Image (spheres, grey):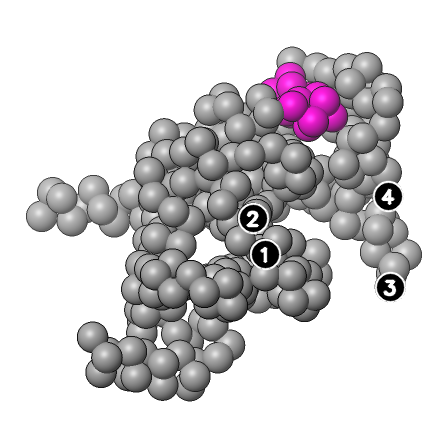
């Protein structure tokens, strides 16, 4: 009974909304300024970004400025445990304020509202903690993707148990965002029928918990509504469909390059061969047929 109560408590903690952070006006002004600066410089690639970010530093924004400066440098430090560890609750909310200011300022369909109004609303609202966690890892994703253009990550292992992540969802949030940093290019290369390049990039990918990216299958948690830039989607449906797309591109490329052992390994080690997840693929009927056919051959 005690174990059950602890489990229920953990679940409640993991989805609780956080809100009503009180900021001094000076901190709030700096936060709004930082949000507007970020919106104009999302990749933080300007020559003076590190020094410019320093102008927004306050005690409350210290951690966020530190992360953004690492992003601005394009440094491999971004994958250090310090930056991959789940931020504290206050920082998660401040990152969400920055996100909402950015999306408000880049809304092409509606007249942007004053950034201060957006900030105050976010700080007063109750926001699903799952949205907050996913948002943080999305913010650093672009820097990692840029590094992957030239850096071989194959000797790097992301131990998802090392970053203060408490649930399968939290671990998958980091996994999905890291995965997208590495595999988004698969779709373009598949369209170009550049199978050799897909294999080349796949060979440079890191491992997760000591195993290849396709072997990670810990997605057995309840799906939930999640909002991207505008549209509300189901979280697992969105991200697992992206994983299926990457797996399909990788399998097709390995088959085209006559690497049948790799093709089979990807299939049997991944969610490609797990019926419980087929509904998230956008291609459920074909996966069911492939599953039946493959099991007959075993």
Q: Residue at x 59, y 25 (%)?
A: 76
| Separation of residues labelled 4 and 2 (CA atoms) | 46 Å
Q: Nearer the viewer, mark 3 or mark 4?
A: 3
The residue indicated by pointer 2 is 200
Crowding near the residue tagged with mark 4, few <14, some 14–19, many ≥20 C-alpha atoms within 10 Å: few
Q: Which label belongs to residue 109?
A: 3
Image x and y of residue 248, in percent = 49, 67
Secondary structure type for disc 2:
helix
Q: Nearer the viewer, mark 2 or mark 3?
A: 2
| Separation of residues labelled 1 and 4 (CA atoms) | 49 Å
Labels 1 and 3: the sequence-earlier one: 3
Labels 1 and 4: the sequence-earlier one: 4
Labels 2 and 3: the sequence-earlier one: 3
**What residue range appears in magenta?**
60-75
Please name whichever residue, 143 or 110, is drawn nearer the observer in this view of the structure: 143
Q: Main secondary structure of the magenta part?
A: helix
Asked whether residue 234 appears in the rendered view, the answer is no
Secondary structure type for disc 4:
loop
The residue indicated by pointer 4 is 114
**Image-quadrant location for residue 209:** top left
Labels 4 and 2: the sequence-earlier one: 4
| Separation of residues labelled 2 and 1 (CA atoms) | 6 Å
The residue indicated by pointer 1 is 196
């Amino acid at each position: 009974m005690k174990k059950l109560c602890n489990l229920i408590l953990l679940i409640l903690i993991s989805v609780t909304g956080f809100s009503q952070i009180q900021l001094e006006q000076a901190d709030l002004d700096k936060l709004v300024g930082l949000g507007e600066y970020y919106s104009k410089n999302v990749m933080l690639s300007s020559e003076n970004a590190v020094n410019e970010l320093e102008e927004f530093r306050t005690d409350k924004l210290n951690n966020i400025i530190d992360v953004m400066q690492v992003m601005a440098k394009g440094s491999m430090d971004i994958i250090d445990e310090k930056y991959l560890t789940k931020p504290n609750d206050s920082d998660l909310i401040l990152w969400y304020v920055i996100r909402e200011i950015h999306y408000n300022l880049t809304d092409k369909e509606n007249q942007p509202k004053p950034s201060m109004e957006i900030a105050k609303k976010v700080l007063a609202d109750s926001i699903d903690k799952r949205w907050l966690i996913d948002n943080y890892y999305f913010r650093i994703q672009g820097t990692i993707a840029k590094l992957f253009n030239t850096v071989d990550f194959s000797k790097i292992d992301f131990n998802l148990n090392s970053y203060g992540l408490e649930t399968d969802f939290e671990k998958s949030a980091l996994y999905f965002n890291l995965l997208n940093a590495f595999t988004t290019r698969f779709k373009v290369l598949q369209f170009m029928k550049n199978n050799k390049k897909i294999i080349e990039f796949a060979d440079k990918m890191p491992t997760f918990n000591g195993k290849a990216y396709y072997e990670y299958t810990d997605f057995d948690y309840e799906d939930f509504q999640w909002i991207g830039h505008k549209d509300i989607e189901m979280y697992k449906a969105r991200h697992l469909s992206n994983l299926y797309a990457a797996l399909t591109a990788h399998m097709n490329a390995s088959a085209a390059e006559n690497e049948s052992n790799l093709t089979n390994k990807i299939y049997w080690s991944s969610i490609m061969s797990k019926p419980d997840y087929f509904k998230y693929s956008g291609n459920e009927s074909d996966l069911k047929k492939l599953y039946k056919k493959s099991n007959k051959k075993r």
